[in-house]
Amino acid sequence: MNPCHSHATWYGLLGPVEVLRGDTTLDLGPRQRRVLLTRLLIEDGRPVSIGELCRDLWQGYQPAGAVSSVRAHVSRLRSVLDPVRHGRSRLLVNGPGGYALKVPREARDTTRFEESVAQARKFMRRNQLDAAHKELDGALGLWRGGALGDAADHAFAIREVARLNAVRQDAEELWATILIKQGDLERAIGAAEGLTLSAPLREASWALLMRALYGAGRSVEAVRQYERFRTMLASELGLDPGPGMRNLHTAILRHDTEVLGDPRPSRSAVVLSDGPDPTAVPLVGRSEETGRLTALLRAAAAGRTQWAVVSGEPGSGKTRLLDEMSSRAAAADFTVARASGGQALSESHGISLVCPATQLLDALRPERADARPDGTADTERLTALVRELHRGPTLCVIDDLDWASTDFHTLLRQLAALVRDAPVAVVCALRNADGPAASGLLADLARHGATRLQLDPLSVADVAELLIARGESGSPEDAAALHRRSEGNPFTLGELLKLAPDRRTGPAAQVPAAVSSVVHTRLAELTAPARTMLSYAAAYGTQLDIELLAEVQDMPRERLLPLADAAVTAHVLVWEADPDEHGTGRYRFPELPREVVLGTLTPSSRQLLHASLARALAARPGADPERIAEQLRAAGPMAPETSDRPVRHPAPEQGL
């Protein structure tokens, strides 16, 4: 019997579900029966009703004979798991609450894994690095594949899969920390790079990668990884790295040996989680996009050059999707080269800005990056890129294409013309595929058959899936409320989920600090008249009444409409087109931006706005009395006599 197994019968869930009796693997039967076994195992001996089993196994589409099928599967599982029982089984029992599988916790690999990681932490605290390393080797060796195997895509399994994956991430970060402390830096770099791909939002993983690179004498590359992480946060989430990361970055720039000479794991890197990482947002709602990109990789592996363009508004998850594709490509033995159209750092030229083409070359041939002379001509770069791209399966990922120079656009056009039948996939990401910055390039790529992917907002169902993945209630009501408040934007949704449940929606709802910062930045880009218009609009409600806003500001409608359009471009307002009539629609003020705008006004300023709106509404023939009363109540002591003629009160600029 395997020495890791302390029980005569051993149950494995860290991969395809398996049951070992001694050294013999039991035949568990067809997939549905294995899923049933997994469902019972994760309940830890608690009963599950037959109705719930039917719903979970068939995921809501159960056939007419589902109950009989479940009972038959249970009977056969008893025969396999408890073959020598006398009378009723004490292992797989049936009671008033349903079926329950009474397996000792210590007979499962999940328990052994978590106990081993906890023991490794104890060894770390005592500075017993070899013992901790050995314990973690055994713990991570228990994984045979994805957690829960065939059942992983079932709704009942999402929470447990996320929890186990979070514990595994903790364990791998601890393992990388031990490698750094032991001086095994190359292995530590490889481990940390894998961690940043599997959980690209965890600062602890990026910090480990930076420490390992610095320890290996690759300080400039360590700084470049910081810039990569910072750029990802800024472009996708509108955030800056935390104080710990910024301090580590400064220490590397200054070669501060007091900070870097004795690297220590951050607390978040070694603490076991009771659930999924609250800061990481699982990739949901992108199955079609990942499927198309995976097909693109398969075609590239077969020797057919592929191009793709991913577009989406800020926070839509472009970088997250590219990281997922990069991870899949690396697993398929592709060489993965990343570049950014914005700022980046060069290993060969120290801390300096380099163009995306040079970034790609450095990634494709790191052993020769230092030999690249200054001022490499575009033709030389093109020749070198073509040569490198023909060496083997390669994925080139280019983020922030909006910010790349026209010279780089020209180089990409030339690459598309020259590299036709090579095992290469090139994926570019940008915010607006219809904008003028890259329109000419994208038109040329389209002629070469480039795949276009537009990342739309998440759906209510996607939000429900994300809630379940976090171990929370995925009720339709909760999902709909969060979807409405986040507008389906993955960044905004992720920030809302960091709040306590009662602070996300409802009367006590808050605006997450990161979201507020993003909205303030967008407001700062608008003109003063546009910000004034938004103050009135926020006081009125979520739907913009253009005629009313023009009236209270004593402004012609023709002047006000461009202000509203500028706010739409800045992602403060939303234009909702009428599906039945071309060219018509309405402006809408999303919840969170509206609350940010209202929050910038003093109470008296808001009351003046409401008073002005009440006057204008009262002067309208056939005005809605409820709407007038609402504005009068909000105006408080500033409430006017509704018989007064409309008077314009300028909106204050403070806070905007």
Image (cartoon, helix red, strand yellow):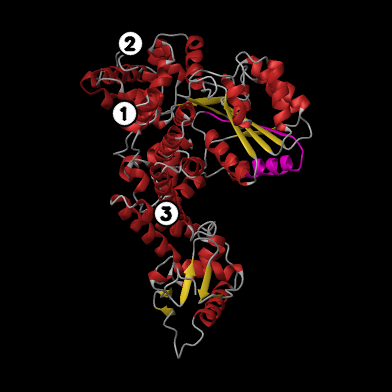
| Residue sitting nearer the eye, 247 or 287 | 247
Residue at 58% x, 21% y: name it: 402
Q: Mark 1 — residue?
A: 630
- Which range is magenta? 290-313
> Mark 1 packing: few (<14 Cα in 10 Å), some, or many (20+)?
few
**Res. 624 in view:** no
Residue 49 in the image: x percent, y percent?
Answer: 44, 71
Q: Nearer the viewer, mark 1 or mark 2?
A: 2
Residue 5 in the image: x percent, y percent?
Answer: 45, 71
> Mark 2 packing: few (<14 Cα in 10 Å), some, or many (20+)?
some
Which label's residue is closer to the chain start, 3 or 2? Answer: 3
Residue 99 lies, with reference to residue 509, above or below; the image says below
| Residue sitting nearer the eye, 250 or 608 | 250
* Amino acid at pointer 2: Pro
Q: Secondary structure at mark 1?
A: helix
* Amino acid at pointer 3: Arg
> Mark 3 packing: few (<14 Cα in 10 Å), some, or many (20+)?
many
> Is 301 a magenta residue?
yes
Q: Secondary structure at mark 3?
A: helix
Q: Secondary structure at mark 2?
A: loop
